[in-house]
Amino acid sequence: MEVFGDLNSGNCLKVKYTADHLGLSYRWHELDIMAGESRTDVFLAMSPFGQVPVVRFDDGRALGQSGAIIRFLARGSVLLPDDAFTQAEIDQWMFWEQNFHEPNVAGARFHVVYRGEPVETRDPDKVERGEAALDFMEGALKTRDFFVGAALTIADIALLGYTRLAPQGGFQVDGRKAITRWIARCEDVLGLPALH
Ligand SMILES: N[C@@H](CCC(=O)N[C@@H](CS)C(=O)NCC(=O)O)C(=O)O
């Protein structure tokens, strides 16, 4: 399969973490989203969302949205247990990530990392909501090692994408001990170097 992505994007890294962990082979196409490479006619014909990540499979079909992609890639693997209720619990965290976490944590980081603007000029609303999302994760992780069940699933991968990168967007992760331990646990399972 081919992955159209940006290695600076947590959404795209979710796909990379999943594919690498499962040993799936792929060809990575690095796109410059700031230069509009996800908005060209050719790209939009493949995925109308005009955003990365997109995966194009060998049969020509393409899929966008990081959560949909990793859910599809992980089917039948340890990252997505068969039990229907367990899958719904995983979905619950993945929907929450897209609704409350990503728009704020990734949104504030975008301002700093992609636009090159000072941390002090981040949107205060995104900062407040991003901090609240991280606090919520911290509370949840005080009583569990992974978000669903006893082992890493795509719920963890979905949340790891931007939580691991949150300090780049001006969010403190160090002071949140449960998140810090969880990131280290995920990095250990996924074979990733410690970032912070
Ligand atoms: N909900 C989408 C969000 C994807 C997204 O925001 N992609 C950004 C990079 S992180 C992008 O392609 N931005 C370029 C643009 O919108 O033109 C997902 O989870 O895949």
Image (tube, rainbow, N blue to C red):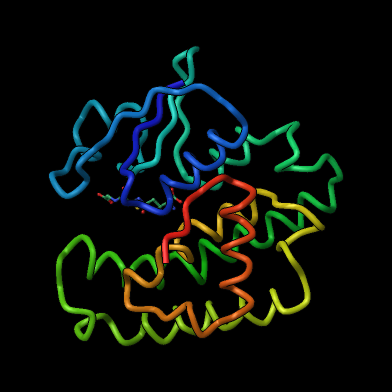
Front residue of 180/156: it is: 180
Residue 76 pos. (x, y %)? 75, 31
Tell me: residue 75, above or below residue 14: above
Residue at the image position 59 percent from the left and 46 percent from the top: 190
| Quadrant in the rendering for residue 117 | bottom left
Residue 94 pos. (x, y %)? 61, 57
Residue at the image position 27 percent from the left and 35 percent from the top: 30
Residue at the image position 41 percent from the left and 45 percent from the top: 12
- Furthest-top residue in this view: 59
Front residue of 140/99: it is: 140
Front residue of 156/190: it is: 190
| Quadrant in the rendering for residue 110 | bottom left
Quarter placement of the C terminus:
bottom left
Residue at the image position 46 percent from the left and 20 percent from the top: 1
The answer to whether 169 appears left or right of 35 in the picture is right
Front residue of 41/59: it is: 59
